[in-house]
Image (cartoon, rainbow, N blue to C red):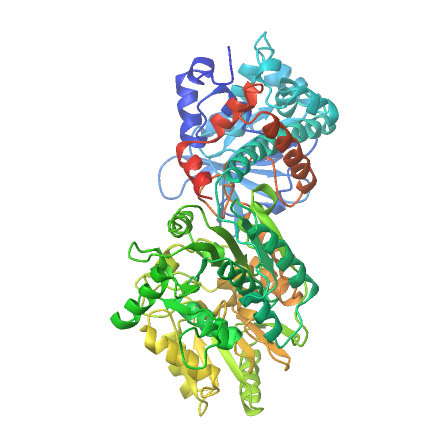
């Protein structure tokens, strides 16, 4: 064996190698050695059988309690039923083949490892014909060995058991060379770094994580191997940061006496301390001659739009233009109106009532009429419009800018990498500065904040005058009178002169309804990988399709909300109808707006004080928080009711209870991250189980990641090409495939 790149088939044989590749994508010795145990067991330590969940592929360590052999009823032959126990709970093992053999082997009192898929038969949990690994007299040498050491339990499948993997790992570790062939040259962590943080060498860590003498040794090995992942990843990102710093950008310094100063003087409110600090930081970034790449994150209603407008005006004062990319037409129209109102006469250049020193705000969406579209395109191309607000329509080849200096991306998780890059390429001679904004940080955003190359500004304060929001879970299935009371509360709010939202997961009429998504065929819907966590099969939610706006609206009009002025809003409506509905609601001409998640972001109606979210368990944590932020935007207290049919004790109810318990969006983002994980940090997946990271987790390893970032940055700055660190360069090369490299190039 010569390297970690040795093909597995030359080490463990072709048959085993094929199974490992098919099951886990493991092709080399290094791949197998980095298929780490997920836990360790000891002979006297039995698996908690009560914690097993139906549908899981599990490997359990248990004791045989009872063995029964009986004739089968449906066909000839006998079956074997074995009951194993951990001392508290039991699990049935059912064998249809090799009945006589296993009847002799599985005698009461024997300990063993049993693997299979958990199912239920007649109310009892079972493993049907499981894989078995017995410990006892027939395997005395191995049993004695296992009695004194930890037993690694690997992630496994129905075709490749944990002990199959352990057997293959043993072939490598039992080699007389004992991983000595890795050597110093094969270790991606510099010796000085390992000494500073008291880390084992790579060979020792790999040996210890698979064959630890005790849990302390396993823990040391995990820490060292976490460093591998963090350091290599941070080295990649440090290289990207270094490359980005060399890219040209036009400096846009603040100009005294310009539009920004005039705008600040016109503001009817005082900026919070956080807004002031973020403004200073962003202003300094814009004044540099390399591109800003900054994330502005803050609570719903924390005033991110004002910060973005101030940055746009600084760029306009310096001779450039700004583009704001919004995920939906409703939000684009909302942004255009709010920015125009904020600017007042300074946003009406060349028009009646416009100030002498002013710019123009243009709106560009896919559904604009021909005349309006031509005017918007001309304003953007000529530079007459200093601010261009739009949806995906901005990405088309026909849209040109005179001098694009700043790209603002609202709700950045709604856009794919390619879309952001397409707009960035519209800058003429240099790359534009980029400001991305999000309210509640979603898992990928949080991950990239810590792992990635985004500079970050955070707004934690809410502007003065924001009202509190009370949130309650409404268990509609078990307590239908609670739902009746929810509709009464809506009528009470309307009776007091206020307004309400009712939100449903889908529009209605879709062939294949998808929970919590605007299924209108728009690019925004297609490129929204993080909009919602769909209900899991085991979450306990209703088995029916999610409630739809087009179904609920007439039922409410004829039932509990009869007599109120109802409006419907969803993504399939023509743009004019959507805008009309939103304008009517904002003007107080409608009492209740029944909508999909099209109202999730950016919609600002201060008189709206109540929101009822139907099938709330169909939405993700971040999305619920975003929706809730549409109420309480005025002086009156807000009310958010989360209606669900999920049973008490289910994961869905736990998630809703967490949302109801706090208004802290950053705390909720932690919960969202815990549930959905970081995704593939170097790939295109923005949620779900991670690929490039096996041990490292954002929730528990922040400090380690921070140290790795500092160390990797120092190494890359002193040796950008890593000529003096060949093992690190090789590790980066094996981590990044072409697709991932392209992603980083565009990120």
Task: Spot the residue most to the left.
Answer: 370
Viewer-nearest residue: 351 or 443:
351
Q: Is residue 145 above or below residue 373?
A: above
- Left or right: 401 in relation to 186: left
Q: Which residue is drawn at the image coordinates 66% and 66% (left, top)?
A: 661
Q: Is residue 1 above or below residue 265?
A: above
Is residue 149 visible to the viewer in this orientation of the structure? no
Asked which quadrant contains residue 366, the reply is bottom left
Is residue 310 visible to the viewer in this orientation of the structure? yes
Count of marks, rendered view: 0
Asked which quadrant contains residue 742, the reply is top left
Image coordinates of residue 211 in percent, x first then y, are 64, 22
Image coordinates of residue 596 in percent, x first then y, are 43, 70
Image coordinates of residue 687 in percent, x first then y, are 49, 48
Viewer-nearest residue: 155 or 452:
452
Image coordinates of residue 86 in percent, x first then y, are 66, 39
- Left or right: 268 in relation to 249: right
Q: Is residue 28 above or below residue 229?
A: above
Viewer-nearest residue: 434 or 387:
387
Task: Spot the residue most to the top.
Answer: 176
């Amino acid at each position: 064996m010569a390297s970690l790149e040795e093909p597995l088939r030359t080490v463990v044989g072709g048959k085993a190698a094929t199974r490992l590749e098919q099951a886990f994508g493991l092709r080399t010795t290094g791949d197998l050695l980095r298929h780490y145990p997920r836990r360790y067991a000891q002979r006297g330590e039995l698996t908690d059988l009560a914690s097993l969940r139906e549908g899981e592929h599990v490997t359990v360590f248990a004791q045989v309690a009872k063995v029964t052999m009986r004739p089968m009823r449906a066909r000839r032959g006998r079956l074997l039923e074995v009951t194993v126990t951990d001392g508290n709970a039991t699990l049935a093992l059912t064998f249809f083949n090799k009945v006589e053999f296993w009847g002799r082997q599985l005698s009461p009192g024997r300990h063993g490892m049993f693997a299979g898929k958990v199912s239920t038969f007649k109310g009892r949990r079972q493993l049907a014909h499981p894989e078995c690994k017995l410990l006892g007299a027939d395997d005395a040498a191995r049993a004695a060995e296992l009695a004194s050491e930890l037993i690694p339990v690997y992630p496994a499948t129905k075709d490749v058991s944990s002990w199959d993997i352990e057997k293959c790992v043993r072939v490598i570790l039992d080699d007389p060379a004992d991983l000595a062939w890795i050597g110093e040259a094969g270790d991606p962590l510099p010796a000085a770094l390992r000494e500073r943080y008291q880390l084992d060498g790579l060979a020792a860590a790999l040996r210890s994580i698979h064959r630890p003498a005790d849990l302390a040794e396993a823990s040391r090995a995990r820490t060292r191997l976490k460093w591998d992942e963090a350091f290599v990843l941070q080295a990649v990102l440090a290289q990207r940061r270094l490359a980005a710093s060399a890219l040209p950008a036009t400096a846009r310094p603040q100009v005294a006496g310009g539009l920004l100063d005039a705008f600040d003087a016109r503001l009817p409110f005082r900026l919070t301390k956080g807004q002031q600090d973020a403004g200073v930081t962003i202003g300094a970034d814009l004044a540099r001659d390399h591109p800003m790449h900054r994330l502005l994150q803050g609570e719903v209603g924390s005033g991110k739009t004002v910060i973005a407008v101030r940055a746009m005006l600084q760029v306009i004062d310096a001779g450039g233009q700004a583009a704001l990319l919004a995920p939906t037409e409703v939000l684009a129209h909302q942004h255009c109106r709010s920015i125009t109102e904020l600017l007042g006469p300074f946003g009406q250049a060349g028009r009646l009532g416009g100030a002498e020193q002013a710019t123009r705000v243009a709106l560009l969406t896919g559904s604009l009429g021909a005349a309006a579209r031509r005017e918007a395109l001309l304003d953007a191309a000529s530079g007459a419009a200093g601010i261009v607000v739009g949806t995906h329509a901005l990405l088309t080849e026909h849209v040109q800018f005179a001098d694009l200096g700043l790209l603002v991306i609202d709700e950045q998780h709604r856009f794919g990498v390619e879309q952001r890059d397409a707009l960035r390429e519209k800058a003429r001679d240099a790359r534009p500065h980029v400001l991305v904004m999000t309210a509640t940080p979603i898992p990928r955003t949080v991950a990239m904040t810590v792992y990635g190359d985004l500079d970050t500004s955070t707004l934690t304060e809410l502007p003065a005058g924001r009202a509190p929001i009370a949130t309650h879970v409404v268990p509609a299935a078990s307590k239908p009178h609670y739902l009746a009371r929810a509709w009464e509360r809506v009528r009470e709010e309307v009776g007091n002169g206020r307004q309400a939202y009712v939100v449903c997961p889908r529009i209605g009429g879709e062939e294949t309804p998808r929970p919590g998504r605007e299924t209108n065929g728009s690019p925004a819907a297609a490129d929204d990988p993080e909009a919602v966590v769909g209900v899991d099969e085991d979450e306990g939610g209703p088995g029916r399709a999610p409630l739809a706006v087009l179904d609920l609206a007439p039922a409410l009009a004829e039932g509990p909300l009869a007599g109120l002025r109802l409006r419907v809003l969803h993504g399939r409506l023509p743009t004019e109808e959507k805008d009309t509905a939103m304008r009517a609601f904002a003007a107080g001409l409608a009492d209740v707006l029944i909508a999909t998640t099209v109202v999730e972001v950016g919609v600002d109606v201060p008189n709206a004080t109540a929101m009822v979210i139907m099938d709330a368990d169909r939405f993700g944590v971040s999305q619920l928080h975003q929706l809730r932020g549409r109420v309480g935007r005025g002086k009156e207290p807000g009310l958010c009711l989360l209606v669900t049919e999920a049973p008490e004790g289910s994961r869905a109810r736990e998630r809703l209870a967490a949302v109801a318990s706090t208004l802290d969006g950053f705390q909720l983002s932690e919960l969202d991250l815990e549930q959905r994980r970081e995704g593939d940090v170097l790939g295109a997946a923005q949620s779900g189980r991670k690929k490039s990271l096996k041990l490292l987790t954002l929730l528990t390893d922040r400090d380690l990641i921070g140290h790795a970032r500092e160390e990797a940055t120092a190494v890359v700055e002193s040796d950008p090409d890593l000529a003096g660190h060949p093992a690190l360069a090789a590790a980066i090369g094996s981590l990044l495939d072409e697709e991932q490299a392209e992603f980083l190039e565009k990120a």
